[in-house]
Image (cartoon, grey):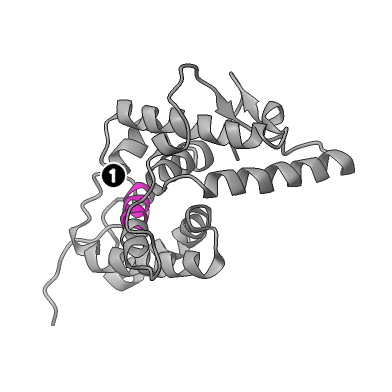
Amino acid sequence: MAPSRQSHSSDGHPASSHGEADTFDALYRDNIDLMYRYASRLCGETEAAKDLVQETFLNAYRGFKNFRGDAQISTWLYTIASRACLRMRRRRKGAPERELSLDEFIPTSDGEFRLQIPVEGLNPEDALQNKQLREALDTAIGKLPKKYKMALVLRDMEGLSAKEVGAIMGLSERAVKSRLHRARLFVRRELSARGLAEDTVSHQGKSIT
């Protein structure tokens, strides 16, 4: 008989008597959609996203015995997925030896803004424009170096706080905000080149959804 150990439910609390396997199954069911969405935004390609989700939950299962509930399950999974994404990128055949620095994309600049795309109450014409904006935004974000993309996706698309993003990426809040600022500037420049930035940049608007 395997030695008993305390496991945790999907909300980070001690698991019930159903057993660790049942608890992890529940964790998987509760978070699979969240992780697939995150993986899709990071990877862009469907197969790469599926591979990342598989790697994430495999690593989560292996480390489940060490999870103590100090963080939310979702934050723990985001952390695993983010690290797995970086490892998978390094392993991927044909990946560049050195990832470009954002310095090679844009100069630094002052100013703060948020990216947003309207999603509600759209007529057919606006809906088409919205689709074009989303495609342009996905293309721009896809060009970001991975460490900047990860910060942008977690903060502006997944809706995490700068503190939560820092915990996931192993950065201070200041470093997260710096990466976010520069990532947003790059995305704005990419959208401006296509005449779209005014529709997606707001100084007080909601973040990307």
Q: Residue furthest bottom?
A: 1
At 48% from the left and 43% from the top, the residue drawn is 153
**Quick one: 17 or 94, which is closer to the camera?**
94
Q: Is residue 123 at all visible to an observer of this figure? A: no
Where is residue 105 drawn, in percent x and y? 47, 37
User: Residue 109 location in percent, x, y?
Assistant: 46, 20
Q: Quick one: label 1, few (<14), some, or many (20+) residues within 10 Å?
A: some
| Secondary structure, magenta segment, majority class | helix
Check if residue 82 falls in the magenta segment: yes
- In the image, what residue occupies the spot 58% across and 44% down? 140
Magenta region: which residues?
75-83
Q: Examine the rendered structure and indicate whether residue 195 appears above or below residue 32.
A: above
User: Does the magenta run of residues contain 90?
Assistant: no
**Percent x, y of residue 94:** 40, 68
Instruction: Name the kind of residue labelled 1 in the image.
Output: Ala
Q: Is residue 73 above or below residue 155?
A: below
Q: Which residue is mark 1?
A: 71
Q: Residue at x 75, y 41 (%)?
A: 130
